[in-house]
Image: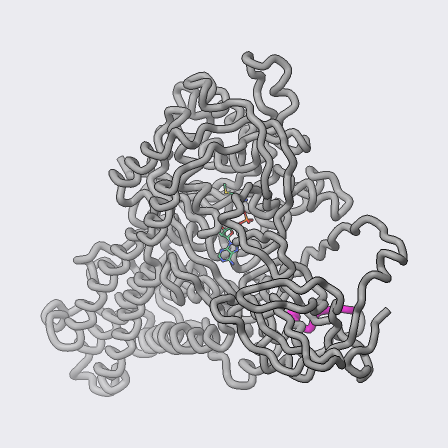
Amino acid sequence: MTRPFYVTTPIYYVNDVPHLGHAYTTIVADALARFHHMCGDDARFLTGTDEHGQKIVEAADRRGLTPQALCDEVAPRFRQTWLDLGMRFDEAVAHHGFARDFIRTTEPRHKAVVQALWSRILDRNPDDLFLASYEGWYCVDCETYYPESQLAKDPAGAWICPTHERPVAWVTKETSYFFRLSAYGERLLEHIERHPHFIQPEQYRNEVVSFIRGGLKDLSVSRTSFRWGIPVPEDPRHPGEAARHVMYVWFDALTNYLSALGDPFASPAPAVERYWSSAVHVIGKDILRFHAVYWPAFLLAAGLPLPRTILCHGWWSIGGRKISKSIPATRVSPLALAADLAGSSSVPATGIDAVRYFLLRETPLGNDGDLIYEGLIERYNADLANDLGNLINRSLTMIVRFGGGAAGARDAALAATGPHASLARVAVEAARDARMALDGFAPSRALEAVWRLVREANAYIAATEPWTLAKDPARKGELDHVLHTLAAALWWTRLLVAPVLPATAAALDGWLGAGVAERDARWPSEDGFGLDLPALRPTAATPLFPRIDDKRAAALLASWLPPELVGAGGPPVPAGGASPAAAPVAEAAAAAAPLLPTITYDDFAKLDLRVGVVVSARAVPKAKKLLELAVDLGEERPRTIVAGIAEHFAPDALVGRRVLVVANLAPRPLRGLTSEGMVLAAGDDAILALATVDAAAPPGTRVK
Ligand code: ME8
């Protein structure tokens, strides 16, 4: 019986369109599923969309849509993106050889299981779900309450969410159902202790352990302030009460991992029994607590087994700036980036492979990654165009030219000598190391190992010089062996790159004439190098990863506007408002913030707005967001103004700039300084542009 391997991605909120960050998680999960399938495991892949909750209600309101209409519009875009990235759903088994599912939390199959889970928790221990009231700071982006100890303050003194860096809202006392999370700390710690693979990599395990040791608070798990959620089942203890509540979106969302397998309480529950305990949840570090604390606690309360592993990765940023809805240049579309990279490739889908390769190779899983466009082009040229592309081209050209359409013939005696033996040794090590790395969730190490084979095979061509052998009929046997060994190296390369570079593997299949369907390709067995070649009918390759020369690199870099140029003195925005950050930027889901209540002119007149000129600017020690500005307002001495703009502007770029200042704001102590006013800027959590005047009005000029 094959081993099950069930891998999941987070289900993504439909208030955003898919960007490179979402693509990263999904590609990691996809590569793991492909790898396990190739190893003969019974793989299963799940992704989907998270469609309930306050955040979706607000996003729908902003667009003037019903929540359902918003979900129906955005969910297919996620599905289509994964399809465009090579992940089929409907015909998955026929194509990939293993099942892939896409779940939406508005589907009846999901809702029924969420309600069953709730009821089971209540049945097992009524104390675990109880009514109480709560008030506190809420971040709608996280869909979670925060104690003040976990919040930060912005320069204006407002509490902000540590993950989204946006103001949190005070939710006044509301009665809701609570889950008795506080009762599960010890059992969670025990599970983590006994299962070292439960939270990976190690750094995240430690983070969760200290969070639990800090004491768990009971968790509010229902809402009465809106209706867009799964109804709480009738509660015999409080007749009529449950009807007022919908479930907290995280209770609902986390359950997708089970509901996609069917009802865990049904008997029999074949898919649950088969796959559940092999589950690996791939997630970003922003949602670690929900997966490593809340979710296992709900499962324990329901008497269900826990998933095998929570695999947590870091955050991708672009040019040092976090991918954020409000900085359009960071919201790179994986598909547009792939199309740009593919350029004139004979196989456009290899642009997607290039993106997959970069994301998985560049940063060890678990660490944060920064996409620097110059680095992307460098890696593309070195690893894909040069190492891999050349190997494929040169080998196939020589096999076709010197082998007359056949893939040579192995000479067992020769195979044990010199460069032939060392290539075989490196190949075997590459297959073994890559397998171990992928088994241990380290795709970047796996790719490093595979590239040792690719480079060794290139060195083999240089060492054996097939073109010299071809000139000497007496060395025909040696030539045949070299061609056979090159075919063997290509075949293994095709197999070892397949989890990460599926389009490349498919192209190689075609050129080698291997006739092996994707679903049938298996990870090589380590003693098989040179012995496991299927019948081949090689043909010459066409360019797969065309080199990006300096001219094209310059054009790409210009179109991929680096985020540091957006706003702060960057190129002007062309008339019509289109951002100069063209491809590969996803269209922004531009959502204007709702207007504040109307004020009178007298209210406005209380503001004393002045033109100021920045005289000096410097970073505030130990406050990565803050700059200390000296701003000339035409007074005796410049004002000190502490502004939360350090992540958007280099201090030097500000000196000499005209800014607008709220000059009569009460002075505020901040980080040992006193801020004597506020600089105006346009933007949301991420400030894109400082407000200014369009002529050289002298410092101190009143703005009305
Ligand atoms: O949190 N770098 O959905 P979400 C790396 N619906 N990964 C990133 C990223 C970045 N810059 N940006 C996003 C939710 N991600 C919930 C999940 S699961 C039961 C419910 C990835 O749409 C990363 O995996 O906000 C992160 O955890 C996820 O997208 C958040 O997606």
Spot occupied by residue 665 in the image (x, y as percentages of width and height): 72, 63
Q: Residue at x 23, y 66 (%)?
A: 427
Q: Quadrant of residue 424?
A: bottom left
| Image quarter hosting the C terminus | bottom right
- Residue lying farthest right? 601
Q: Residue at x 31, y 63 (%)?
A: 445
- The reply, left or right, for residue 229 in relation to residue 476 is right
Decide whether residue 204 is among the magenta residues.
no
28 and 118: which is toward the camera: 118
Q: Is there any visible trace of residue 466 in the rendered image?
A: yes
Q: Residue at x 22, y 84 (%)?
A: 469
Q: Is there any visible trace of residue 400 in the rendered image?
A: no
| Image quarter hosting the N terminus | top left
347 and 200: which is toward the camera: 200
543 lies above or below 154 = below
Q: Residue at x 59, y 46 (%)?
A: 139
- The reply, left or right, for residue 699 in relation to residue 504 is right
State which region is magenta: 577-582
Spot occupied by residue 658 in the image (x, y as percentages of width and height): 73, 79
214 and 504: which is toward the camera: 214
Spot occupied by residue 272 in the image (x, y as percentages of width and height): 39, 30
- The reply, left or right, for residue 457 in relation to residue 375 is left
Spot occupied by residue 363 in the image (x, y as percentages of width and height): 39, 64
Q: Quadrant of residue 322?
A: bottom right
643 lies above or below 551 = above
